[in-house]
Amino acid sequence: MGKQRVIVFAVSTPTAVEPPRTRERILDAALALFAEKGYDATSMREIAEQLGITKAALYYHFDSKADIVRAMLADTERRVAELAAWAQQQPCTPDLSRQVLARWSDIMQARGLAAFRFVVANRAVIDELGPERHDGMHACVGDLCTALVPASASVEDQLRIRLALMSINMAGLVGTDIDADESDLLTAARRLALELLPDA
Amino acid sequence: MGKQRVIVFAVSTPTAVEPPRTRERILDAALALFAEKGYDATSMREIAEQLGITKAALYYHFDSKADIVRAMLADTERRVAELAAWAQQQPCTPDLSRQVLARWSDIMQARGLAAFRFVVANRAVIDELGPERHDGMHACVGDLCTALVPASASVEDQLRIRLALMSINMAGLVGTDIDADESDLLTAARRLALELLPDA
Amino acid sequence: MGKQRVIVFAVSTPTAVEPPRTRERILDAALALFAEKGYDATSMREIAEQLGITKAALYYHFDSKADIVRAMLADTERRVAELAAWAQQQPCTPDLSRQVLARWSDIMQARGLAAFRFVVANRAVIDELGPERHDGMHACVGDLCTALVPASASVEDQLRIRLALMSINMAGLVGTDIDADESDLLTAARRLALELLPDA
Amino acid sequence: MGKQRVIVFAVSTPTAVEPPRTRERILDAALALFAEKGYDATSMREIAEQLGITKAALYYHFDSKADIVRAMLADTERRVAELAAWAQQQPCTPDLSRQVLARWSDIMQARGLAAFRFVVANRAVIDELGPERHDGMHACVGDLCTALVPASASVEDQLRIRLALMSINMAGLVGTDIDADESDLLTAARRLALELLPDA
DNA sequence: GATGAATGAGGATTCATTCAT
DNA sequence: CATGAATGAATCCTCATTCAT
């Protein structure tokens, strides 16, 4: 039936009009809520309401609630995995731990203190997130630890490295009671973590 | 088809030989589940099923789910409060912290490693348990900390005492990855906590 | 540990006081709705509303929506399975089919015409109900058919027995357009099913 | 970051070289899915995914989910209506039924066995498709039946014609258990349907 | 001490559908 | 022709809780 002949002159305005970035907004809102009230205690409704969108909109961007966490963690997880891989190939000098600790701190800092809190306060959730155990956050951290302190080391030394890493994160939790701003808190936490290291 | 008419002659033996202790069993089961999967992720049904009793039976012994946690924490909380009160009246010598730490460790050990895990992993829950803020666990710990390190101290020192206390508890969490038994883990955790103290 | 000594005099009263029989009422209501609108198109809310109870009450009596269907079918399925087992051990005389047909008709009649409709109109649902394929309704019917007509028989004969059985059920479906009462319809359906049998 | 400036000169060739026939593809996919899992259990998403297009694309071609079914049935329905009209004007000889049956079989065969299954397994859906009762499939079949067997006939005879027609369709359902190809099945079903007719 | 039956609120998730582009 | 983003209403189901017995 004779197609239409269409001529379109589409001239887009040079000013970046509006990047809808909803996905990112969801991740931010979810992280904040999860960190504050915990994963289970945060409902999809709450997340949606805080953003002024519908629950269904969340499901357009993420397959499930767990999927939001996965996305939230994906970046961090990848970086931890890389760090672990790198550490495993280094000679296990006393200095290696220091470097690892510094990078761990940087990784955790990427998403702000909320992420720190989240990791500590939602361990159970994170663990059960993926059945593919060895790709999960937990496994990555495990790898990282054994790279620094072999499984054959003393209990105390194994604990040292783990507490050192977690101290960085704990700072986000216990810090709420201390009247100080985030960066001061982190600086202090890093110093203390160093003290915990095996031979410092 | 005609109900059965039941006449029961229940003749209980007078000697109360067996204390049913259901209440205690509930607390134990709940602690284990809360520590493993988190407070929110654990339902009253699960607790009841694990004990082979009815949900309603739980409500015979406890007013609510939160009440179970409260009971679980009541003893610990009282002891922490006492510890805080005692510490507040001591001169703030460097040795005080050591003593407090030792008693904290004892208190936490009372219910086993599960309780440690619980405290760290369910902070949000514990906080919102009582609207009477100052009776809550959280507040007690706060008091304890300010007794040892005044709010006017350096950020680092405030962090020191808090991380030291939490290290004891974290041991229960990160310890799952270390192949060691509970007592060894605790001994090591105590030593490391000492290292973190302000002037050790 | 001092047990209770229990003496029970069970004297059944002849007057049936009040049987709450909610479970049965649910099954009846569900059957009616499923038959009328189909399984998927019937929501738990509708079933509950029709009975004047809550959705949650349904879940007290049944584990899931599918579970209602399972319970609905359980009795029928068992009887079909028995019939199949019995038929498999009979000599495959021309008369056997007649007897089977009669009993099939009786079985289906047990829950009224609605059940007939249900079986035909919700085949897909019934099939996917249990992953344990060979215990399912479908398999039972299959067994019954092969008991009467071996898998090696002509296509026509295999079809005969199946259509004969299904004709009984179809009567419930197409019967809605015929102005007649249930029993007349069934009598006629039985006669026609007989005509379809292999060598009648 | 400055959008791209797009200028499109879309000049469609008048000769319709490639028929995209998406509409037909949708109908085929939908029929297959509806027949397999039922209308309600099949979502627009599934249909779209199977075709590798978007849900929204479905709505470009059809106004609604029900509309897909309507389109699917439109052709068949028209032919059944024609058949009914023709039959109503014929003298009601014993031979008429045979001719009707043959044409019914042809009509149903047009879209393959899936269509047969669909009709039987989704009766409720089809009925409620149009509020204009007398245009619906169901009504057409009713007209066809009364053309062959007056509403005043015996219950058995009314049932005969209906079961005969439905036998053709049932063959598609029960046939899945018989190891035979479609055409053999249909031939057999036609023969059996003939046997059911009033005076055969 | 404990149960069986029930409730109301809310959980995560999916659906058919719309609309600007 | 078709999509990406979104909606509102509905889905099944679970939860903490209650209460008569």
Image (tube, coloured by chain):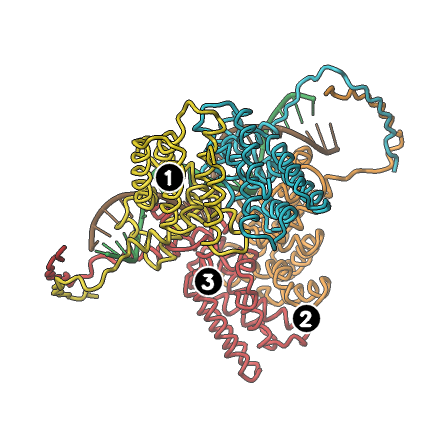
Chain colours: A red, B orange, C cyan, D yellow, E brown, F green
Chain letter of disc 2 in the image: A
Image quarter where the N terminus of chain C lies is top right
What is the three-letter code of the residue carrying label 1?
Val
Q: Is residue E9 above or below residue C7?
A: below
Q: Secondary structure at mark 2?
A: helix
Q: Secondary structure at mark 3?
A: helix
Residue D59 position within the rendered picture, expressed as x and y whole percent measured from the top left: 28, 48
Circles 1 and 2 on the same chain:
no
User: Is D85 positioned to the left or the right of A94 in the image?
Assistant: left
Residue in view at x 42 percent, y 36 percent: D124
Q: Nearer the viewer, mark 1 or mark 2?
A: 1
Q: Which residue is mark 2?
A: A155
What is the three-letter code of the residue carrying label 2?
Val
Residue A144 position within the rendered picture, expressed as x and y whole percent measured from the top left: 55, 73
Q: Which residue is mark 3?
A: A73
Circles 3 and 1 on the same chain:
no
Query: Can you tell which mark lies on residue A125?
Result: none
